[in-house]
Image (cartoon, rainbow, N blue to C red):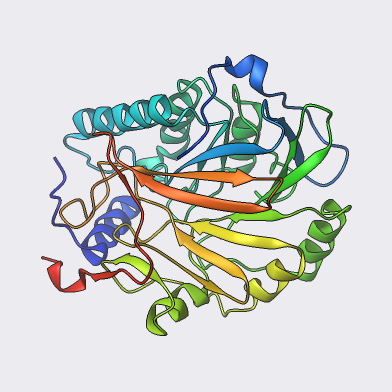
Amino acid sequence: MMDGRLTRRAFLKAGAASAGAVLLGSAVFPEERACAESGKAYGVAQLTIPHSTRFRILQFTDLHLFADEVHHHEVDRQTSETMQKLVKAAKPDLVMATGDLWPENRDGMGETYMRSAIERMEALGVPWGFVWGNHDQLPDYVVGHNAFENAKNSFYRGAATDGNYVIDILDSRKRRVWQLLCLNSHESGVKIAPQLQSDLIAASAPPVPRTAFFHIPLKQYDTVWKDGTAAGVIGEEPCTADEDGSALPFLRSIGVTACFCGHDHVNDYSGAIDGVELVYGRATGAGGYGVEILPKGGKLITINCRKQQHEWVSLTPDGKRWAPKPGERIDRRGDRKG
């Protein structure tokens, strides 16, 4: 089994080497709770929620299936059990997987790994979405986009838009009450080119509150910890890749009130800047590093459309729920081993 003490540096080095070689519940069945249909606009899916004002998203991130080349069957079984337990406990309207589902295109197996990951998402039996992580690599991304778009219960609509798409949240009268913005941060971080800006502005009309999901954190995730704004747990320096801080002003301008990312397995904190809350998801996969610092789990996000508010709590498969108290700052960077 993968050593839980593995650091990010060792984890990434191993991956590169391989490549080179509370909350409202619902008892309604998924098919009755949601409808998915292709939108006429830019990369749009539509999710109809059973409750007129509130809906729940369960975020998984950094599943890292097949990461342990020797013991991946046992490790991946643990990850699947975690996913199933959290879905059962949270009863989400949507599951959002924010990247790093499989280990690159190791030994040319990228597509095989991807299809196995998709099967695990389908097996959850609930609507789900996906945004690409830096480890989600394929020999042919067209195949990948189409596979995600055509998967059972999938709300992925990024096949024609390089993995960028939106999910409209509709009430029982088919009125849009919220919008989820799903962005492909590739390997270098979120970059919102002029054409993407134009597409997203068009997709946002008429305006509603929006929540963004992507894998690699924005530069401001580092800022909110360093300036004392953030509360929660930090276990490593934020790895924001090449993102230069320019994405957040645009996201704020189109009504984004919160961003949820992954990537840094041992960070679980949030902080607000310029009216936007920046939140780390809780790393989910047993094959990823950092379990000795932060137990694996997921993040349950509850959005109140009427009040235009959201709240979140981190979940672990043993039934525990955690969110930091105001001003609670836990620094575990000194706990890293290896």
The residue depicted at 40 percent of the width and 58 percent of the height is 263
Of the pair 305 and 10, the residue shown nearer to us: 305
Q: Position of residue 240 (x, y in %)?
A: 46, 72
Q: Position of residue 212 (x, y in %)?
A: 62, 56
Residue 183, can we see it? no
User: Quadrant where the N terminus lies?
Assistant: top left
Give left or right: position of 41 versus 104: right
User: Quadrant where the C terminus lies?
Assistant: bottom left
Give left or right: position of 18 versus 119: left
Of the pair 96 and 171, the residue shown nearer to us: 171
The residue depicted at 72 percent of the width and 27 percent of the height is 36
Residue 292, can we see it? yes
Residue 192 vertical placement versus 120 (above, below): below
Residue 103 vertical placement versus 13 (above, below): above
Give left or right: position of 279 versus 209: left
- Res 235 quadrant in image: bottom left
Q: Position of residue 59 (x, y in %)?
A: 47, 43
Q: Position of residue 239 (x, y in %)?
A: 40, 71
Of the pair 135 and 55, the residue shown nearer to us: 55
